[in-house]
Image: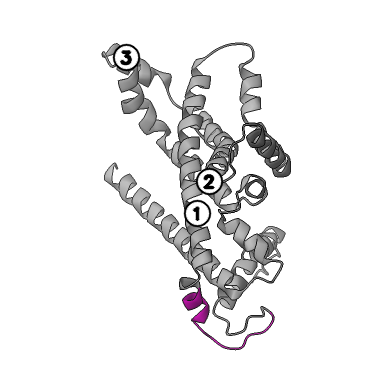
Amino acid sequence: MKKKKFQFSKFYLALVTLITYLPIVIVVIFSFNDSKLPVSWKGFTWKWYEELLHDAALKEALVNSLILGAASCAAAAVIGTLGAIGMARVHYKSKGMMEYLSTIPIMVPEIILGMVFMAFFSLLNLPFGMVTLVIAHTAFCIPYVFMMVKSRLVGIDKSLEEAARDLGASPARTFLDITLPLIMPAVVSGCLLSFAMSFDDVVISIFVNGPRISTLSIKVYTQLKTGVTPEINALCTIILVVVIAVMLLTCFVKSRTSKRYK
């Protein structure tokens, strides 16, 4: 019998997986811990989930984050998609430079963007609050949608649009019936990534946030001064379950769709 050779690649993959997911598993486990201190296990309990349901400030912050993420990713989807389509249809020497400039918000550190947005809104005398948050988050979410759609447009056969135009379809009808369905997976991917980035952002939100609005990320960050309670672990667990459920539902819909068209 031949001895199995040690494979470093499998060990490395297992190590990376362990380092990546072990903190998440610990958060889920300690969301059921009876102790407030995340250093020892004192028994199983549901009380942190019960307290989470009665925490009005935390629920308000969660709702604000959901509204902000939905508004900013919707606006970014429209602007980023139209920008990518327009950029794909023009031909001029500075096109490459314009595409590069469109991705600058991703490469610039968030603290710099936050300071720029704060100075810009102060110059316009725009009150800090949900409006400034949506504008700022939309600005740094646009490149994610732009890059996704731009990459998708490269792989689309241009003869499909030309055939639709030859058959008498107007530019708007060609876009709605041909181009939009083909790029929709990229638009959805860009929206999901934009929503995640908006939901997770702390630095820019602190600079452009008003005194009456608190997002979930800011709420968690400010609680670090007094210590994060297990309610945050419970909230993270609920969000994780929702994300996994959405992923499973997406995989199920894709599998049913692929079988239908086979």
Q: What span is colored magenta in the figure?
A: 39-51
Q: Is residue 210 visible?
A: yes
From mark 3 to mark 1, how far is it between C-alphas? 44 Å
Q: Find residue 110 and report its horizontal and vertical position in percent.
A: 69, 43
Pointers 2 and 3 in contact (CB under 8 A)?
Answer: no
Q: Which residue is located at x 47 percent, y 43 percent?
A: 71
The kind of residue on which mark 3 rests is: Arg
Mark 1 secondary-structure assignment? helix
Of the numbered discs in the image, which one, if any, rests on residue 130? 2
Of the numbered discs in the image, which one, if any, rests on residue 165? 3
| Mark 2, other Cα within 10 Å: few <14 / some 14–19 / many ≥20 | many
Q: Find residue 227 and report its horizontal and vertical position in percent.
A: 68, 72
Q: Which residue is located at x 47 percent, y 24 percent?
A: 85
Mark 3 secondary-structure assignment? helix
Which image quadrant: the N terminus? bottom right
Image vertical order of residue 122 relative to residue 17, above or below: above
Pointers 3 and 1 in contact (CB under 8 A)?
Answer: no
| In the foreground, 104 or 19 | 104
Q: Find residue 38 and report its horizontal and vertical position in percent.
A: 66, 78
User: Which colour assignment does the render follow?
Assistant: one colour
State which tag comes first along the sequence, 2 or 1.
1
| Mark 3, other Cα within 10 Å: few <14 / some 14–19 / many ≥20 | some
State which tag comes first along the sequence, 2 or 3.
2
Is residue 213 shown left or right of residue 75? right
Q: Residue furthest bottom?
A: 42
In front: label 3 or label 1: 1
Identify the residue position indicated by label 1 in the image: 64
